[in-house]
Amino acid sequence: MTTPSLQDGIDKAGSPIDLLWQPNAEPWTPEVVAPEYTGWRQEQAAWHEGVALLNLSHHMYDLWIEGPDATRLLADHGVNNFEKFAIGQAKQYVPVTRHGHIVTDGILLRQAENKYLLSGIPAAQHWVQYHAEKGGYDVGFVTDASSAFRPGGGDPKLFRYQIQGPLAAELVQRAFGAPLPETKFFHSTPVTLDGRAFYALRHGMAGQAGFEFIGPWEHAAYVHEAFLKAGEPLGLVQVGALAYTTPSVESGWIPSPVPGIYTDPDLLEYREYLPLFGIEGKRPLNGSHFSEDIEDYYVSPYELGYGRLIHFGHDFVGRDALLKAKEGPLRTKVTLLLDADDVRTVIGQGEDPGFVLSYARHRVENTSGTVGTTMQSASIDPVGTVLAQALVDSERAATGTEVTVVWGEHPGSGTDPDADLGFPRIRATVHPAPFNEHARTLYRRNR
């Protein structure tokens, strides 16, 4: 039996929206990792106040790209600057379509002169591999899907453990017996632990210092146990799947935007190449902001705050469109601080709503009407309420602007997108993105 493609799914459903719109869709959380270890509140507090251990080994999709044309392939299909890309350095890789809409982002690590590792949500990997095959680039690929989609099950090729928080450096020194070499943000350094070789990527989350340790799976259990033992005197807290999903809301990173691939006739072959049962066909849309046109959900890298990554000194797919978009009307990424009393009333029915996580597109309004949409929302216990990453009209993006979030689930096709469905409103105040001041200021300074 032929495996159905993304285009097959669109044709059967009738439209991309009819394929993807799923009211009340369950939000994604990392596979394999326990939902909570000590409780999501304590786990959030750990990376703000102490030290936390996060297991990223199972939900990352890895694609190794190696060959004489590896750099040319990635530069032709990504906005990034490849003129200054050292071996051992990582970048947030941003591919876009010819119309300048983002496909998604990923973490790209240069491992050798002609070898890269692209990790994250697999839409970027699919894009790169398709264009390599179609364009005849001299490269080869090795793939390791996430644990939920790995054919035949089994273990991942790599372990990934993050050590995060104000006490991260102290824990690492205890584990290795000495401080790690001074390493720039988003650069890596080789390390050994009792003869086991792997590497440390200087990384952080929600404004806190930290490292991501990456190495062969055969060393996973030993390294994990060593970190637990070294962290015990410091009150190390393991972070479960619920709390793990929340730092991006503080850090200003919007995960898994809708890829701009569903409507362009020139991408028909690409949609026929993609499997229906992949991220592009199965990541649901829901919320109070509904449109029959999937293009209303496309986003520009400028809107996501990636303008600083765009390097016009080389030719790449989407370059001309991004040059035009730079001057055009764009939405601005902001953080919405939701009113705590309204959150308790609307979401918690007067009680503490507990853990809230939503990737729904909820309408953002003011007295003049709709001014934007949320992209993700989550409880942030150190803040005391729910924060939402949102894209709003640029003239409504000033800090302190008051808006409301329409909290509800539009049923989809067959109901007017602008119908008054009686959804409750939650008052909110606009803040910068990233919300966390350290993430907003020092991250980039340390790159």
Image: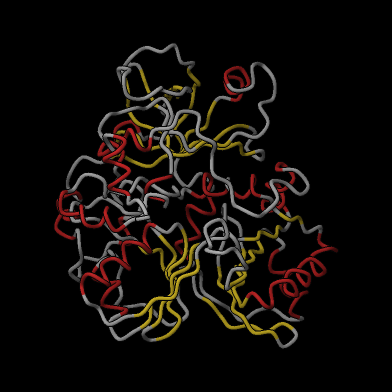
Instruction: Left or right? Give the position of 143 relative to 99.
Output: right
Query: Which residue is rendered at x = 23% and y = 55% of the image?
Result: 97
Q: Is residue 234 above or below residue 142?
A: above
Q: Is residue 398 visible from the viewing direction of this image?
A: yes
Q: Is residue 211 visible from the viewing direction of this image?
A: no
Residue positioned most to the right = 233
Query: Which residue is rendered at x = 29% and y = 58% of the image?
Result: 273
Instruction: Left or right? Give the position of 404 relative to 16.
Output: right
Q: Position of residue 52 (x, y in %)?
A: 70, 57
Q: Quadrant of residue 308?
A: bottom left
> 384 or 294, which is in the foreground?
294
Q: Position of residue 235 (x, y in %)?
A: 81, 57
Query: Which residue is rendered at x = 59% and y = 61% of the image?
Result: 58
Q: Quadrant of residue 10?
A: top left
> 442 or 61, which is in the foreground?
61
Query: Which residue is rendered at x = 27% and y = 72% of the image?
Result: 132
Indicate the quadrant containing the N terminus: top left, top right, bottom left or bottom right: bottom left
Q: Position of residue 419 (x, y in %)?
A: 33, 14
Coloring applied to the structure: secondary structure
Indicate the quadrant containing the C terminus: top left, top right, bottom left or bottom right: bottom left
Residue positioned most to the front = 1
> 232 or 274, which is in the foreground?
274
Q: Quadrant of residue 200?
A: bottom right
Instruction: Left or right? Give the position of 425 relative to 11.
Output: right
Q: Is residue 352 above or below residue 273?
A: above
Instruction: Left or right? Give the position of 183 relative to 240.
Output: left
Q: Position of residue 135 (x, y in %)?
A: 20, 72
How many badges with numbers are in the image? Answer: 0
